[in-house]
Amino acid sequence: MAVGLIDDNVLDLFDQAFFAGHEAVGQKEIMQVGWVYRHPVDLTALRLFHRNLGSGLLGRRIERSPLPFGRHRWVSDRGPTDLEVADHPRPRSELGEWFDECAYRPVDPVGGPGWRLSMLPLDDGSTALSLVMSHYVCDGIGGVIAVTEAILGHDRALGYPPPRSRGALRAALVDAGRTARDMPGTVRSMVAAAREARRRRDDPRSATPHGARPSDRDDESVVLPAVIAHVDRDAWDSTAKSLGGTPNTLAAAWTTRLAERMARKRGEDGLLTMQILVSDRTADDNRAVAVSLARARIDPADVTTDLRPTRAAVKEAITAFKENPDESAHMAGLIPFTPQSMWQRLIDWAVDDPDQPTILSNLGDVGEVVTRPDGTQAEYGYARGVNQHFTRRRLERMGGHLQVLYLSMPAVGKISLSILGYRLDGDNSRAALQEMVEQTLADFGLTGELD
């Protein structure tokens, strides 16, 4: 195979950074998509859907460079040979627990498989489906695209080589050549890194001495309480309009209200900080992660009565992000040269965020195809991100955690809110989180079915 073709499967630098940084601290991020059918499913069609998933963005895994400073590469991996079907039905009341069980079973973006599709019959005649995928293979919008293409039978034809198709010597020579060609960009990144280091000298998070903290790898993992709320789409849209906003603005306002209820940290001005994930993925984009973070400061005082201030705050945050891109983009050339110890420090720096932001992932309107994995319309659908190794030590340093993923499903007529929440001081049961979610919906005159 020609070198030019081999280079087509090189990971984007930020994909490599996302993977390497999390690997250094033992963090394992996954994406999960779920469906619930109230009518019988077509098992033959589901198996075809399963097979088609291996022809899209999920049909790959990461192969590390043999060089410590080399670029990692994508190789083909169609995934498991068949979907997993549970042997026995479970009570409908255990659906949320089953989704959690699926989410916390390991998937491997390097050794494979990087994804898994599971099916569970429920005792009320319903059927649940769970698709779990490594976040280092695909992000939320990428997952929506992968599912949609699999349902439609579209082959993305990525053309990645099979695993270990390069001999060790050839792999080292090709990767060394790539590093040499990238060197001008690497030098520019070194200059940008020096400038950024000077800028951050006074940041209190940069004053932590080397080795001051033990590794999160050996700390106790915590399963965060998770709740899925299904809200009538028409009611959601009507509420947004009556409050002077859009459905997306209502998602930010609702998340702010929940953050207030969970006593997330406020600034001296009384505002809550929210990190909003903004996708920049295009239809032919093969990156694993194609998102950026816009940082909004929102006043929780009027979110239940007037969405205009929230809308203005979100718009200002996104505008500021577009006009002032993250300085780290100029340092991308250093990513392959970053040692594990430095990745650990960088992740520590990100965790020690004094604003303790709430995270909002807004997938928006996902279209009408994605809720038809067997060709017929599921009654419910949802998506969420899960960290499979959230440690108690990290949660304490973060001041707890709150993450909301919002999506709108026109064919189902539902809004899905997937919530992961943890308070340092308080009841961290699923029941307690469900109660707060119900109360927050009621604050906006809304109700929902909760799993």
Image (cartoon, grey):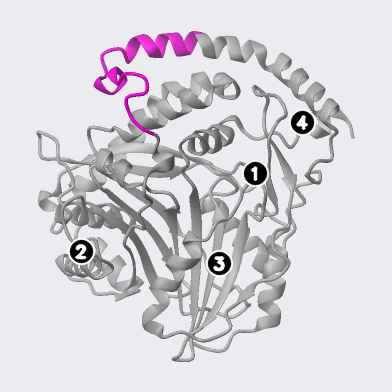
Is residue 87 positioned above or below 194 on the image? below
Q: Which residues are magenta?
A: 191-214
Q: Earlier in the sequence, mark 1 or mark 4?
A: 4
Q: Which residue is mark 2?
A: 242
Q: Position of residue 103 (x, y in %)?
A: 48, 62
Report the mark closest to the observer, 4 or 2: 4
Spatial separation of the CA atoms under disc 4 and disc 3? 32 Å
Residue labelled with disc 3: 370
- Answer few, some or many: residues within 10 Å of disc 3's Cα (few below 14, many 20 plus, some between 14 and 19): many
Q: CA distance from mark 4 to mark 2?
A: 52 Å
Front tag of 2 and 1:
1
Q: Position of residue 337 (x, y in %)?
A: 58, 20
Residue 286 numbered tag: 1
Residue 43 percent location from the top left of the image: 66, 82
Q: Quadrant of the C terminus?
A: bottom left
Residue ranking furthest to the bottom? 124
